[in-house]
Amino acid sequence: MVAAEQRIDSLENWRSTASEDLVALEKRARDLNARVDQLGPARLAVWSLAEADYLVRSAQRAAAFDYDPARAALALNLASATLAPVPGSAGARMALDKARAALEQVRVPDVGVLSSELAQAARALQVSPLREPGTAPVAAAAPGWRGAVQQAWQQLGEIIVVQRVGTPVQPLLRPHEIQYLRQQLALKLTAADFALQRRDSSAFQRELADVQLWADAYLSASEPATTTALGTVTRLSSVDLRPPLPDLSTLGAQLDALRRATGADRGP
């Protein structure tokens, strides 16, 4: 429970930071518009190119390091608008607009929604009936010869495997093995959620594959809730948490070409 609360706090902090970044970008654009009115044509081109360069670099960082295509698209949109007063900037603006449109077309899975679905499936699997119910807990040994017989039967049960004729082999789980199975399923599901929060598709799919394997071996699919939960696990395991983003690396070179063509210095 504490780990889940910590993950929720971490997500909230990330969302707060992302919101602050968006606000900062919009404020920077407003400040730029206020300063544009005070600049002459030559100085305006210098400022516009410097500002566009900053915004393009911000978009590249948002896409490459933060995997935030929405923030990257906003930065490119502002960069395109910033270049509007620069003569001969139509080609660069077209490239910026094309990259922005490509970013907006990327459908990024909502981690919050997927995490809720995984948590719901985890709750169902944790109480799902086992394919084999296991043996009843062993009572304390009776004194005397009765206790000796009871202990002998218990030791014998450790080495004998009971199997129904004509049916697939399904092991009878002892109570401590049932507890271990439940704990391992819980750990696997927690690890899957952790990978989900990091958008680590490989780790996410690996943990869910283990959950599916164990569930198929030990859990009974007779309960509708179990069947639904396993269906959710199967569906989530096919989700790409990091769909590929468009390449933004060439945008800086186009700004450099425009800067040389206009004779503007790199800095304001």
Image (cartoon, grey):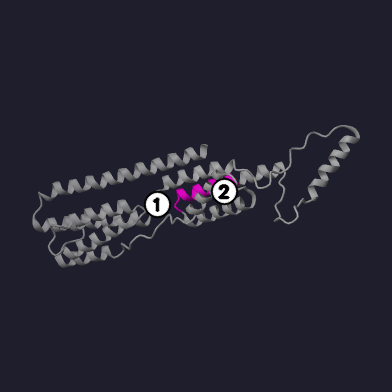
Does dot 2 land on a helix, a strand or a loop? Answer: helix
Q: Earlier in the sequence, mark 1 or mark 2?
A: 1
Horizontal side, residue 160 vs residue 68: left or right? right
Tell me where residue 186 sits by quadrant.
Answer: top right
Q: Position of residue 49 (x, y in %)?
A: 19, 58
Q: Which residue is located at x 25 percent, y 48 percent?
A: 25
Are the residues tagged 1 and 2 within 8 Å (C-beta)?
no
Residue range of the region highlighted in magenta in the rendering: 185-199
Label of residue 188 in the image: 2
Q: Residue 165, image x and y in percent?
A: 75, 55
Toward the left, the furthest residue is 40
Left or right of 21 in this view: 232: right
Q: Is residue 242 magenta?
A: no
Q: Amino acid at mark 2?
A: Lys
Amino acid at the residue labelled 1:
Pro
Q: State the residue in front, 165 or 104.
A: 165
Q: Element at badge 1? A: loop
Q: Residue at x 47, y 45 (%)?
A: 117
Can residue 54 be seen here? no
Question: Gap in Å between the C-alphas at discs 1 and 2?
Answer: 21 Å
Query: Could you tell me if residue 187 is visible in this image?
Result: yes
* Residue closest to the eye, 187 or 15: 187
> Disc 1 designates what residue?
109
Q: Is residue 193 magenta?
A: yes
Where is 73 relative to 20, above or below? Answer: below
